[in-house]
Amino acid sequence: MGNDEAVLLGKLQGGDADAFITLYNQYSPSLYTYILHFINTPALAEDVLQDVFIKIWEIRERIKPELSFSGYLYRITRNHVFKLLKKITADEALRLRVMQDLYQQTTDADTLLQWKQYETLLHTAIDRLPPQRQKVFRLCREELKSYEEVARELGISRNTVKEHMMLAMKSIRFFVYSNADGILPLLLTAALLKDIPRP
């Protein structure tokens, strides 16, 4: 960190709005790109960016000019991103909004190809399940049968069905997350979880 930035941070601690704007202009482009890596939705990425700098302003008195401001900024940004991703997977309305945004981006060939690659990845993850687990998963997920119905159809206990589903979701989630970047894997697995009938 240069002396100029240390001076800016000192001014920021004192509530200097011009110093804050200078730091915002300096870091916001790279931070926005960083956020988009996780959240491929410009509107939401912009929201996260604004939240991060609001947080910086709120805690400005605690910032230490002698420490790496860049590292501190990216740490706060990462925390905000992960909080939003967690919220997206739990909030149906927000998840739908993000899915719609992503679909709207599929007008260009590269994005459409990426979308199809993620869908293929999800199907590959399902196909890699052991035969009995895959059968249980497809009955619950694709035919929307209850655990009780699947247990009767396959001649196994309800607890065995439940265990197969838990292990299937764990395997699918791990495979998708390990082979894809960004928000789409989270959305796909969240949608997958939502559609599984509750026992």
Image (cartoon, helix red, strand yellow):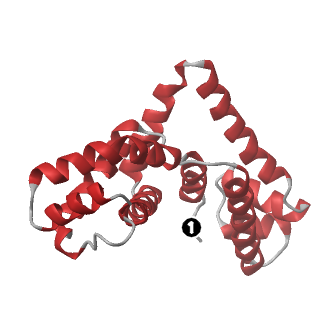
Q: Position of residue 180 (x, y in %)?
A: 67, 48
Given residues 5 and 193, the one toward you in this image is 5
Residue at image coords 27%, 63%? 6
Q: Is residue 109 above or below residue 38?
A: above
Q: Is residue 136 above or below residue 111?
A: below
Residue situated furthest top in the rendering: 108
Question: Could you say which quadrant of the image residue 118 lies in?
Answer: top right
Q: Is residue 165 above or below residue 189?
A: below
**Which quadrant would the C terminus be assigned to in this image?**
bottom right
Residue at image coords 39%, 37%? 42
Residue at image coords 62%, 48%? 181
Q: Secondary structure at mark 1?
A: loop
Given residues 13 and 162, the one toward you in this image is 13
Q: Is residue 191 left or right of residue 82?
A: right
Q: What residue is pinned by disc 1?
A: 198
Q: Is residue 3 left or right of residue 77?
A: left
Q: Residues within 10 Å of mark 1 (few under 14, many from 20)?
A: few
